[in-house]
Image (cartoon, grey):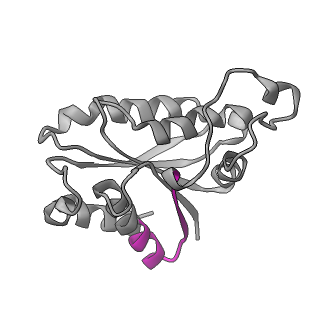
């Protein structure tokens, strides 16, 4: 059994990428794993100010918010799923803020399996590549990181459009394979 942490960057509850997270979670639970999904937009997470207080304080951040708990869950997880809608060919601000705030204890986030989920209104998969590269850039900083899968959901904009996408089934099946 693996500990799976899903970080849903979608600001829309029940949005397309959030729905894919639910399907991934359902698959991983059906496979017998311990799974938690965090809707990042529902947490209080401030922006990193680059003060580096964390370097002088043993990884304690100067900002007192929900990030310390999320970061501990990232450290404890075996699998991390990063999911975002594509905004201007990149990760949304909510999830990018989480990634930036891992700096407080970034060396402790290691030996993780990563899965990436991206949704976009654009029909072309190539339009999501910059976003996926942002995820890969973060994983490149994680010692022992292994990319295990990417779910590209294209041509989805309005809430619910994901229901007609093959990505819905793919998210469930990918979760099953964790």
State which quarter of the image contains the N terminus: bottom right
> In this rendering, would 34 be left or right of 169?
right
Q: Is residue 31 magenta?
A: yes
Q: Residue at x 53, y 55 (%)?
A: 42
**Location of residue 123 with respect to 24 vertically, above or below:** above
Q: Is residue 35 magenta?
A: yes
Q: Residue at x 62, y 56 (%)?
A: 77
State which quarter of the image contains the C terminus: bottom left
Q: Residue at x 66, y 24 (%)?
A: 49
Highlighted range, magenta: 25-40
Which of the two residues, 160 or 24, is positioned nearer the viewer here? 160
Which of the two residues, 176 or 9, is positioned nearer the viewer here? 9
**Location of residue 135 with respect to 36 vertically, above or below:** above
Q: Residue furthest top?
A: 51
Q: Is residue 107 visible?
A: no
Q: Quadrant of residue 131?
A: top left
Which of the two residues, 140 or 161, is positioned nearer the viewer here? 161
Q: Residue at x 39, y 67 (%)?
A: 22
């Amino acid at each position: 059994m693996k500990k799976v942490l899903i970080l849903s960057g979608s600001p829309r509850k029940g949005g397309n990428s959030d729905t894919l997270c639910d399907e991934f979670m359902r698959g991983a639970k059906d496979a017998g794993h311990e799974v938690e999904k965090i809707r990042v937009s529902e947490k209080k997470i401030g922006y990193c100010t680059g003060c580096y207080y964390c370097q002088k304080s043993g990884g304690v951040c100067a900002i007192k918010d929900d990030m310390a708990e999320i970061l501990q869950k990232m450290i404890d997880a075996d699998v991390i799923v990063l999911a975002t809608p594509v905004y201007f060919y990149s990760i949304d601000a909510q999830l990018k803020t989480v990634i930036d705030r891992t700096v407080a204890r970034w060396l402790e986030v290691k030996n993780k399996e990563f899965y990436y989920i991206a949704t976009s209104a654009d029909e072309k998969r190539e339009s999501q590549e910059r976003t996926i590269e942002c995820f890969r850039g973060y994983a490149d900083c994680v010692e022992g990181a292994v990319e295990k899968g990417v779910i590209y959901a294209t041509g989805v904009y309005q809430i619910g459009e994901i229901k007609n996408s093959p990505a819905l089934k793919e998210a469930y099946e990918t979760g099953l394979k964790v």
